[in-house]
Image (cartoon, grey):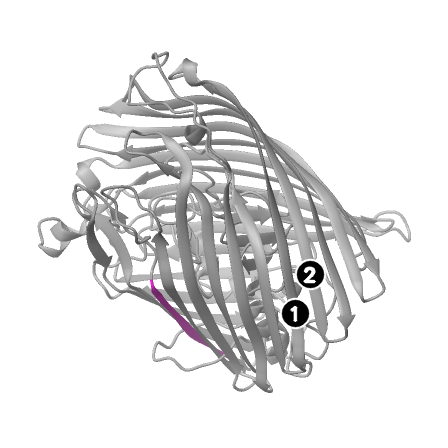
Amino acid sequence: MTLRTFAARSGARALGVGACALLASHVAAQTDDRPPASATESTLPQVTVVGQEDHVDLQGKRADVTVDSTGLPSAVTVITADEVGTLNVGRDISNIFRRVPGVVANNIDQGDTGNGFRMRGFATQGTHGADTAVYIDGVPQNMPSSQAGAGHGPAFLEWLTPDMIGRIDVIKGPVSALYGDQNRAGAVDIRTANGGEVPSSVGVALDRYDGKRLSLVLSNTFPTQPESPPIQSLLIADVFRTHSYRRDGRTERDNLFWKLSTRVRDGQYSLRINHYRSESTAAGYLLLDDLEAGRISPRSTQYGLPGFGSGERTALVLNRTPATGEAGWYATLYGETFERERGIATSAVQHTVGSDDRHFYGGRFAYNLVWNDDAALMAGVELRRDRGNAQRRIWRNDVPTANYINSQGLDLLTYGVFAQGQYRPFANLKLLAGVRHDRFDYEIDNRKMPAASTDYRAGVTTPKLGLVWSVTPRLDLFANMAQGFRSPAAEQISGSGPTGPLGAPGGTIYDVSPSKVRSHDLGFTATPAQGWSVSGVAYHILNEDEIIAQPDGSYRSAGETTRKGYELETRWQATRAVSVYASYARILEARANNPLPNTGPRLSVPRHQLKAGAQYRHRLPGATLTLNADAYLTAGNPYYVGTPQIQLRTMPTYTRYDLRATLDWKQTQWTAYAILQPQRFASDIAYGSAAGLLVSPQPRLQFGVAMRYFF
């Protein structure tokens, strides 16, 4: 059983428990506390939450044979559409993960530059979600060998808006064979909503620092031939404009989403098209020492020269799942164009500009065999083709120069096979096993150093093994051993040498292997009393062959990193109106076992993370009032600075408090929110540099209001 299902099945209509001097927010909203459905109120968002007050027991649930992520022997957190509606998402879609135990997610207001995502000691500074496999409707979102300022494997989720989200599963650890590249810390499975699941609406939101959002949701069900299943349609248009707390910060973003779904014989089919475009400028990062000494204002721009960025992507996705039950065919086909540019200021006159112009297409097919309620086997194949250009170029005084850091034409083909089986020898015991074999067929055209152009062929096999034991109807134990992997970046295969012009002589081809990790988990989920859940997990992860950079700029598969830690979570439905939750995540060890000379061994991830919250939902005459409060704290985040980079600095403790009030009245919804960040220069992400610790100062207070009309 997973951390998540336990919470979701046992008290989770509201999340729960608590106690923690932090106060704070959330909990899955309870639809039972709404006023009796009237003609107008029935148009307001309705969500069925697993595990309501009259259905809390877990007997036999954990050992069920199911392809649902909550049936994995792992810590899993489920985020429902209802919960997303109680979060302060604002300008940063990463905020949808703010209540997940052990997860740090934020882009720190630097424009649309990728979504930082840290989990289990992975994804240190600058990686923007790498090491966690992110899928949306079965489509992998991690971008291999991205040069737009975010490294290898970042996940760019800015094209999502809260209205599009149907459900999110956050899976801790590489325990599922259904997810491939970047699945070292775990996986995030996001599913978009369908037409008919959400009401039609129009909304407007205003935020501090000139934030403006206008959104339109058209949710319809269209009849077809007599006695034929209807077609469900969901069309979402979202326009967002904002400035930043920092001077020279600005974002313009437009999102369009249309999804059609219907049943054909024994299959449920959906077709989705979405388009996203953005333009942004960013104030960059400032030295913490200069801020604390008062030499610069926290609203200043790095080097006095703002960075910039733009993005545009269009995707077409076709999905098929069984219409009833879990047995049968699962299929995904997709194609996408992806263009992104990001300029990072490196001096008062110079930018390093990274750009990607890529085209992705691929798919996956799987069949799930089910034998009664005792066993199941899902087997399938997956393929992804990535073709296009990736480069980083030096600009001076806003004009491109002839000097490049790298410039590559990429033709990357990744394909693999996977199988995942389950067997229940006893009613309270379930065994799981899986395996993936993935191959990489890359053609890399190194335009900066043509002699380093190469073809790369490699493969990696990652087995999985686990069990779930329902000791009593109120206590489940789970354990797993699993391997995950990360592909090598194109730059780690075909080196580009020092900055210079295209067509330069020299160049080196490196013989590196995909990086594998070995993960062990041991955890429990329990319901000590009605409406109260407690869960915890301890983990140990060894990265056996991390790809590391040598002092001469070359790469080799030689590094080892170790990560150890634990997470605890509790949720309590105190009354029908009040629910609370709290979680604590502790990283005991996150270090490079054989660091390079003149580098430190500790990895830049927070040692302590505390999250807590409460929700109050009250019925008023003709209306429903929902109050949410969340508290968030990270501490003990180490960084190395100086030359050589061995001076250890620790980021100041970062705290954040979210307050939100929502009133559902007739066909309208009124919302007011505030975000308090009392530490003046603290942040949950920083960068160690030769000059010192770089941070992005946050405002002490943000606030906003929103109104939505349902029709």
Q: Which amino acid type is shown beneath numbered disc 1?
A: Val
Identify the image quadrant of residue 365.
top right
Q: Does residue 223 appear in this view?
A: yes
Query: Residue 608 versus residue 96: which sits nearer the camera?
Result: 608
Q: Is residue 59 magenta?
A: no
The percent position of residue 444, horizontal first and vertical second, equals: 50, 22
Q: Is residue 556 above or below residue 625?
A: above
Q: Is residue 502 above or below residue 350?
A: above
Taking the image as shown, residue 81 lies to the left or right of residue 632, namely right
Residues packed near mark 2 inside 10 Å, few (<14), some (14 to 19) or many (20 plus): many
Q: Which amino acid type is shown beneath numbered disc 2?
A: Leu
Taking the image as shown, residue 537 lies to the left or right of residue 678, namely right
Query: How many numbered marks have been drawn onto this rendered protein structure?
Result: 2
Q: Secondary structure at mark 2?
A: strand
Query: Residue 346 versus residue 238: which sits nearer the camera?
Result: 346
- Please give the residue where the numbered disc 2 appears in the rendered image: 432
The percent position of residue 349, horizontal first and vertical second, equals: 19, 28
Query: Which circle marks residue 568 in the picture?
Result: none
Q: Which residues are magenta?
A: 607-617
Query: Which circle marks residue 468 in the picture?
Result: 1
Q: Is residue 608 magenta?
A: yes
The percent position of residue 711, horizontal first and vertical second, equals: 63, 59
Q: Say whether marks 1 and 2 touch (CB < 8 Å).
A: yes
Predominant SS of the magenta segment: strand
Identify the image quadrant of residue 360.
top right
The percent position of residue 275, horizontal first and vertical second, equals: 55, 37
Q: Does residue 192 appear in this view?
A: no
Query: Residue 597 versus residue 7: which sits nearer the camera?
Result: 597
Q: Secondary structure at mark 1?
A: strand
- Of the image marks 1 and 2, the number of the one nearer the N terminus: 2
Residue projecting furthest to the right? 226
